[in-house]
Image (cartoon, rainbow, N blue to C red):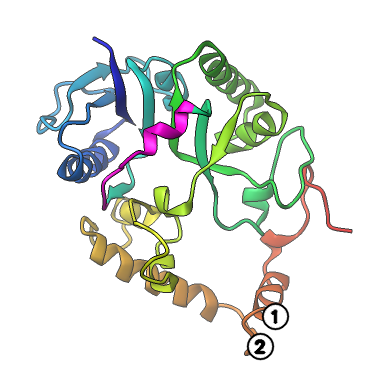
Amino acid sequence: MTASNGVIYVASGPDYLDLARQSAASLKAFEPDLPVDLYADDVNAPDLGMFDMIHLVKNPEPRSRLTCMTQTRFERTLFLDADTLIVGRLGDLFDVLERFEFAITHDVRRASNLIRQGLEERTPYAFPQHNAGVFLYRRSPGMIAFLNEWAARFKAAGVNRDQIILKDMMWRTDLRFYVLPPEFNLRRVTELDAWEPMDVRPTILHSHRLMDHMRGIGPRISDYKKLVEAEREALADEWAAVTVPDDPIAKFSAAQAQMPEAAPVPGQRTES
């Protein structure tokens, strides 16, 4: 059965499946009529009623999502990582695909080696990695070929992060893509504190704090208010770990000079 617009999750193991349930439930609260599919290694797990269709992932592997994304039954698909919470209606988000093959947001921590790294391409600082945890795409021949190539290149490269491969491919591709505003993949949740009332409509929060309980770091977070509190604490700890001047601009370069992860790495251009 095909549909025009829909959302997919990919989850392996009980912890990620639990997060996918939580995220899908938050989505259904705002978009009850939007089809939501799950790709999982356990299709008989309890409490999966919020999913419209469940697809078995027989042999889960690192980044199974890349293969599952090509199997979508939707003409226009929104892939969501399990560590997300939907806090508003998606509105006309899918209409972006009337003009573009896919849409995605910039990743955060863009001054770090982690997010500036590529495998083959040397890109400017202004072209960092994009975060693949919220990925809007069309089911077109060109897009499916792109996803298949991404999966093949990731497997062949032997790296542990698929965004390294994606960065190279986005730099080279002729496919039309769009960079979404951050409220559709809000990785730095504390931006909610900085925005003015008419700046944005918060929509999708995406935070690793939602997985902290899986690492034995504090209680499980299932409420976006608790998530914001945890992110505020993490931000304060991040700045407390470095010595910086009382200057809103100079403090960034001072802090980065104290962090080895901000040093140049192979595969990135350096500023002249």
| Image vertical order of residue 123 relative to residue 150, above or below | below
Q: Which mark is residue 250?
A: 1
**Please, what secondary structure does the residue beneath circle 2 have?**
loop
Residue 231 visible from this viewpoint: yes
**What residue is shown at x 77% (from left), y 48% (from top)?**
124
- Amino acid type assigned to the residue bearing label 2 in the image: Pro
Q: Quadrant of residue 257?
A: bottom right
Residue that carries the numbered disc 2 in the rendered image: 245
| The residue stretch that appears in magenta | 87-98
Q: Is 6 placed left or right of 175 in the picture?
A: left
Residue 161 visible from this viewpoint: no
From the image, state whether disc 1 or disc 2 is nearer to you.
1
**What residue is shown at x 70% (from left), y 39% (from top)?**
118
Question: Is residue 232 or residue 91 the one in the foreground?
Answer: 91
Quadrant containing the C terminus in the rendered view: bottom right
- Amino acid type assigned to the residue bearing label 1 in the image: Ala
**What residue is shown at x 21% (from left), y 55% (from top)?**
222
- Badge 1 crowding class, 10 Å Cα cut-off, few under 14, some 14 to 19, many 20 or more, is few
Q: Where is residue 176 drawn, in percent x and y?
A: 60, 28
Quadrant containing the N terminus in the rendered view: top left
- Residues at marks 1 and 2 touching, judged by CB atoms closer than 8 Å: yes
Q: Is 27 placed left or right of 208 in the picture?
A: left
| Image vertical order of residue 84 relative to residue 78, above or below | below
Question: Is residue 97 or residue 266 the one in the foreground?
Answer: 97
Q: Quadrant of residue 71?
A: top left
Q: CA distance from mark 1 to mark 2?
A: 7 Å
